[in-house]
């Protein structure tokens, strides 16, 4: 009888505050070598996935700004406004950023960064993952995967999760379409977001306040690619616009539709809106 599938992970401590220009690969290797697994082993093995938070990647790459520039940074990082809502502290902007990710404040983050500063996301998280993987594999001779994570909310669900914004050497999407379930039925739509699942599993250990920005996940070697194959990267997980049924917030969609209806009514009535309706859209 074959052994049942098992997954294990460690989030080693000892990673110092990362600063611009720091050698992130060396810091990750030092933490991995110091971590002791339940079987008493240390270091990295073939098939391990090294998960790092985008915060330490951004810090090492110098993506740090003065906090006073946060709103301007959000605007600069924004490609498209999805939704905005006022709250007691100001205005929350849900936007699509230049990486194609839809998230609050374009991913500009004021947590876990020195007082008076904010962090931008890495310029190219997939490239960051590839570079880190190359360094780690060269130093260890191991076949490894790398996932760079960030935190986001989810449509329809409360709470935050970590997801993969960068990946190298990992199967990011496992396409099961065409295979059969255990009842023999063909799967028509199932594509597993493997890299996102790895990111969320790692976040259960790293948390937000533990100062453990690195997690090593073991037991997923079947999802780790050969050493010379970095794979499609996490950018391939972003849903294309043509497939996105929720391109804008509900209030924004309603307002746009209402305005279009008014314009059509004015055109039909020769410049007078139907029923004399004018002004801003009512709340849906």
Image (cartoon, rainbow, N blue to C red):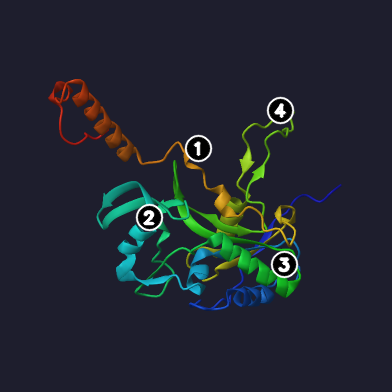
Mark 2 neighbour density, 10 Å: few (under 14) some (14–19) many (20 or more): many
Cα distance between the residues tagged 4 and 2: 43 Å
Q: Could you tell me residue 261's position as x and y percent?
A: 26, 27
Cα distance between the residues tagged 4 and 1: 26 Å
- For label 1, the SS is helix
Q: Could you tell me residue 220's position as x and y percent?
A: 71, 55
- For label 2, the SS is strand
Q: Nearest to the eye among marks 1 and 3: give it.
A: 1
Q: List the residue tagged with mark 2.
A: 78
Q: Residue drawn at (31%, 68%), measured in percent from left and top?
A: 69
Q: Residue drawn at (77%, 49%), measured in percent from left and top?
A: 4
Q: Nearest to the eye among marks 4 and 1: give it.
A: 1
Which sits earlier in the primary sequence, circle 1 or circle 2? 2
Q: Residue drawn at (48%, 63%), measured in percent from left and top?
A: 123
Which sits earlier in the primary sequence, circle 3 or circle 4? 3
On residue 38, the disc is 3
- Horizontal side, residue 273 vs residue 144: left or right: left
4 and 2 marks in contact (CB < 8 Å): no
Which quadrant would the C terminus be assigned to in this image? Answer: top left
On residue 243, the disc is 1
Which sits earlier in the primary sequence, circle 4 or circle 2? 2
Cα distance between the residues tagged 1 and 3: 44 Å
Q: Could you tell me residue 41's position as x and y percent?
A: 75, 71
Q: Nearer the viewer, residue 270 or 122?
A: 270
1 and 3 marks in contact (CB < 8 Å): no
Which sits earlier in the primary sequence, circle 3 or circle 2? 3
Q: Nearest to the eye among marks 3 and 2: give it.
A: 2
- For label 4, the SS is loop
């Amino acid at each position: 009888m074959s052994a049942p599938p098992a997954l294990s992970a460690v989030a080693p401590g000892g990673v110092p505050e990362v600063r611009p220009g720091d050698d992130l690969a060396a810091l990750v290797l030092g933490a991995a070598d110091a971590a002791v697994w339940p079987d008493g082993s240390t270091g990295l093995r073939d098939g391990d996935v090294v998960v790092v938070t985008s915060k330490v990647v951004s810090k090492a790459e110098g993506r740090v700004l003065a906090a006073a520039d946060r709103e301007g940074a959000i605007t600069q990082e924004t490609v498209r406004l999805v939704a905005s809502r006022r709250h007691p502290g100001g205005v929350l902007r849900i936007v699509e950023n230049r990486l194609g990710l839809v998230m609050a404040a374009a991913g500009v983050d004021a947590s876990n960064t020195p007082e008076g500063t904010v962090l931008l996301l890495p310029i190219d998280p997939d490239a960051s993952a590839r570079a880190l993987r190359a360094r780690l594999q060269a130093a260890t001779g191991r076949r490894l995967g790398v996932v760079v994570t960030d935190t986001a909310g989810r449509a329809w669900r409360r709470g935050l999760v970590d997801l993969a914004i960068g990946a190298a050497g990992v199967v990011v999407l496992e396409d099961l379409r065409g295979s059969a379930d255990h009842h023999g039925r063909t799967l028509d739509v199932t594509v597993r977001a493997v890299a996102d699942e790895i990111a969320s599993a790692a976040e259960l250990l790293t948390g937000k306040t533990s100062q453990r920005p690195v997690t090593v996940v073991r037991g997923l070697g079947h999802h780790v690619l050969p050493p010379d194959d970095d794979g499609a990267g996490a950018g391939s997980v972003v849903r294309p616009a043509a497939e996105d049924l929720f391109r804008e917030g509900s209030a924004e969609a309603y307002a746009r539709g209402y305005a279009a209806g008014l314009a059509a009514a004015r055109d039909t009535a020769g410049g007078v809106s139907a029923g004399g309706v004018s002004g801003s859209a009512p709340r849906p």
